[in-house]
Image (spheres, rainbow, N blue to C red):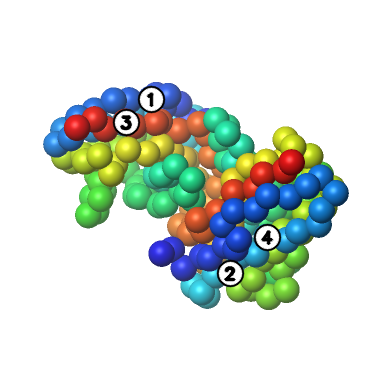
Amino acid sequence: LAKTTQPISMDSYEGQEVNITCSHNNIATNDYITWYQQFPSQGPRFIIQGYKTKVTNEVASLFIPADRKSSTLSLPRVSLSDTAVYYCLVVEDTGRRALTFGSGTRLQVQP
Amino acid sequence: ETGVTQTPRHLVMGMTNKKSLKCEQHLGHNAMYWYKQSAKKPLELMFVYSLEERVENNSVPSRFSPECPNSSHLFLHLHTLQPEDSALYLCASSQFPNEVTEAFFGQGTRLTVV
């Protein structure tokens, strides 16, 4: 089970780009990198998933270097509503495990 | 709206009460999960059901009893709880019972044990 390390908290201002980096040094060949977002008193919500290079969707971009030992979630032009906890998870493609969450990164967006 | 509905949203119960949390998914998923989130702590996986069969039980005390009568419904029966069981209880579902498949979470039930 690949362990992830991400900052406990980050602060930003509206309109800025936010990059949250996650390290996962012992990621395995069958592992994918997945990010979830959780607002207070709600369940987590899937944001993005990738294996290598770059993935982009309407919410965020995910950058994964060639060695895959880290990944960066990029949120373009954040707003107050992006204030949430962001979880980086390394997930195994072939296993039968359920999602296991760490402490995540608490992002606070200021006006 | 995630397609996973939990009721009730809030519940206050005494330590001698018996109550049940309900979860319903309209996504046609085969796997359902219960998670517990205490204040300032990460989500803790409690139970995993795949095609109505319990496939994982993460050392959860017996005062929590899950039930999955069909692939769309999941219950968590509660009895003789302790104040430290107060938490946000989250239900989730996914197409397959593995972590790489996107999971959809309900809004949760905020439980307070008094």
Of circles 4 and 1, the one toward us is 4
Is disc 3 surrounded by few (<14), some (14 to 19) or many (20+) residues within 10 Å? Answer: some
The amino acid beneath tag 1 is Ser
Per the image, label 4 sits on a secondary structure element best described as strand
Residue identifier under label 2 = B24
Residue under disc 1 on the same chain as residue under disc 3: yes
Observer-side mark, 4 or 2, equals 4
Q: Secondary structure at mark 1?
A: strand
Which mark sits nearer the N-terminus, 1 or 3? 1
Report if the CB atoms under discs 1 and 3 are less than 8 Å apart. Answer: yes
Q: Quadrant of residue A35?
A: top left
Q: Nearer the viewer, residue A73 or B91?
A: B91
The residue under label 1 is: A9
- How far apart marks 4 and 1 lie (CA) works out to 32 Å
**Numbered label attached to residue A108:** 3
Instruction: State the separation of the CA atoms marked 1 and 3.
Output: 8 Å
Mark 2, secondary structure of its residue: strand
Type of amino acid under label 2? Glu
Gap in Å between the C-alphas at discs 4 and 3? Answer: 32 Å
State the residue at coordinates (21%, 39%). A78
Q: Identify the chain of the residue marked 4, using the numbered disc in the image.
A: B
| Image coords of residue A94 (percent x, y) | 55, 54
- Where on the picture, by quarter, is residue A110? top left
- Numbered mark located on residue B21 in the image: 4
